[in-house]
Amino acid sequence: MRKSGLLSALAYLSTARAATPEEWRARSIYQIITDRFARPGGDISSPCNTKDQVYCGGTYQGIIDRLDYIQGMGIDSIWISPITAQIAENTPSGSSYHGYWQSNLYELNSLFGSAEELNALAAELHARNMYLMVDVVVNHNGWAGEASSVDYSQFVPFNSKDQYNEPCDIDYDDQSSIEDCWLVTTGTSLPDLKTSDPGVAEVFNSWITGLVSNYSVDGLRIDTVKHVEKEFFPAFVEAAGVYSIGEILDGDPAYTCPYQDYMPGVLNYPVYYPLLETFQATTGSMGRLIEGMNGVSQACADPSLLGTFSENHDTPRFASYTDDIALAQNVLAFNVLADGIPIIYAGQEQHYSGGNDPDNREAVWLSGFPTDAPLYQLIASANKLRTFAAANEPEYITTLTSVLSNDEHTVAMKKGNVVTVLTNVGANGGDASITVEGTGYTGEVMDVISCEPQAVEGGNLAVTLSGGAPKVFYPVEALAGSGLCETT
Ligand SMILES: *[C@@H]1O[C@H](CO)[C@@H](O)[C@H](O)[C@H]1NC(C)=O
């Protein structure tokens, strides 16, 4: 029997939502600070002084206008700043342009655009088969003043003092203090919600159900997760009904990985720090990166659902440590092709170099959005190969990376049929050579970064990395249809 047009349209809408962890696994994410990515109307000249810590004018419409730029990197999902209404004051520590100082969970931050514009962004993403991930904060609100001066009646919906923990400064050696005390009690304080209260949790759960549904959200990035009791999250994530990834800002896999028992994804800080230590200078040790990868694959329940990154809005840009473009290329090749869902922080593709917050929150429009930038091109090649391998090899995404060979400065890693060879000798360190055994390759392979073929001898590769650039190999005969290296 034919359904009416309206009924089938409704059926489509209800099934189009609720992107699961399995659906997110093969995706890659572009992290956007909404205020700092794109201004509407093609504006690429309005200044933005990061030190001022005020709104610079990026909007949802600006993002819509630049989706081709994002897709050109082979990226199919975006993570945007929290969408909720914020405190209005310009405080000694700046304004709420980042979205982490919310005051009303049921209103939108109108400086990013209207509900219609946010819905238009979701619709445009979905028309391109892209996903929308929204950042959400359940740990705290924002208040322009000392903890002692908070007027709780100003907040929506949590407008009563007994819905908050008592102000105290965190003792980072004590997990219950990390959860119950306030992240900030002076300057612009962060009133800490009593998420352990079942009434508070219930309101949060119905709020997130409404938010995901009203704005067609496909995934959540959850802020400051280690500051909230783990027990809060299973019901919250279930109420959201979509893949959720938590920020647990800690590099110890024994601390961070267990959160995967409470939510599907966690940001891969346990690999971020070793990655940085290995590549931020040519003196770094490849053993450090391998140790970090092993730590995660042993401690995390499912490394393929981690969010693997090499920069974000809380960490100094990679190029603030070194301007060596070859080191940046190696970091990005790992970022995209190692285990986990790759996250690229907007501006990284333009080799932005800001240091600590707020310097690392540069306006991306000031780059002019060139697509011929070397890191933009590298991200595109790596992402296209990853997406292609995921479509062609059923086990690719869930197969964990194994190290085939390494020395102090060079490593060859295998994931499915992809072999990635990285080095930290840098652009001026001469050739790095390594013999890679056990690739499983039988025919010719191609380096999809340079599009140069590589000989295979009995399954072994004698690889030379010139100018410190990474190489990423895939069987030539399997590349047909990938759009990589113009194969015919
Ligand atoms: C979602 O929309 C419903 C219906 O308009 C509204 O009652 C609810 O407050 C909205 N929730 C959020 C989080 O915007």
Image (tube, grey):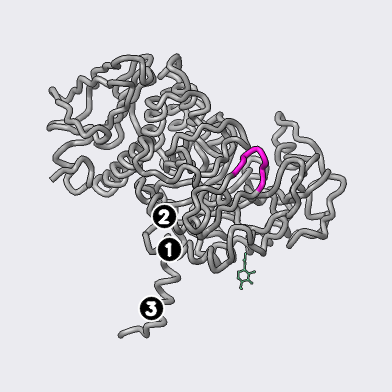
Residue 67 is tagged as: 2
Q: Residue at x 42, y 66 (%)?
A: 16
Tell me if residue 337 comes above or below residue 429 in the rendering. Answer: below
Ligand 1 closer than 8 Å to label 1 CB: no
Q: Residue at x 74, y 37 (%)?
A: 177
Residue 339 is tagged as: none
Q: Residue at x 49, y 47 (%)?
A: 365
The amino acid beneath tag 2 is Leu
Tell me if residue 450 comes above or below residue 100 in the rendering. Answer: above
- Say what secondary structure mark 1 lies in: helix
Percent from the top left, x then y, of residue 295? 47, 28
Q: State the separation of the CA atoms marked 3 and 1.
A: 20 Å
Q: Nearer the viewer, residue 268 or 484?
A: 484
Name the residue that disc number 1 marks: 124
Q: State the separation of the CA atoms marked 3 and 2.
A: 28 Å
Ligand 1 closer than 8 Å to label 2 CB: no
Q: Which residues are magenta?
A: 48-54
Name the residue that disc number 3 marks: 8
**Image quadrant of residue 400?**
top left
The amino acid beneath tag 3 is Ser
Total label count? 3
Q: Tell me which numbered mark, 1 or 2, is placed earlier along the sequence.
A: 2
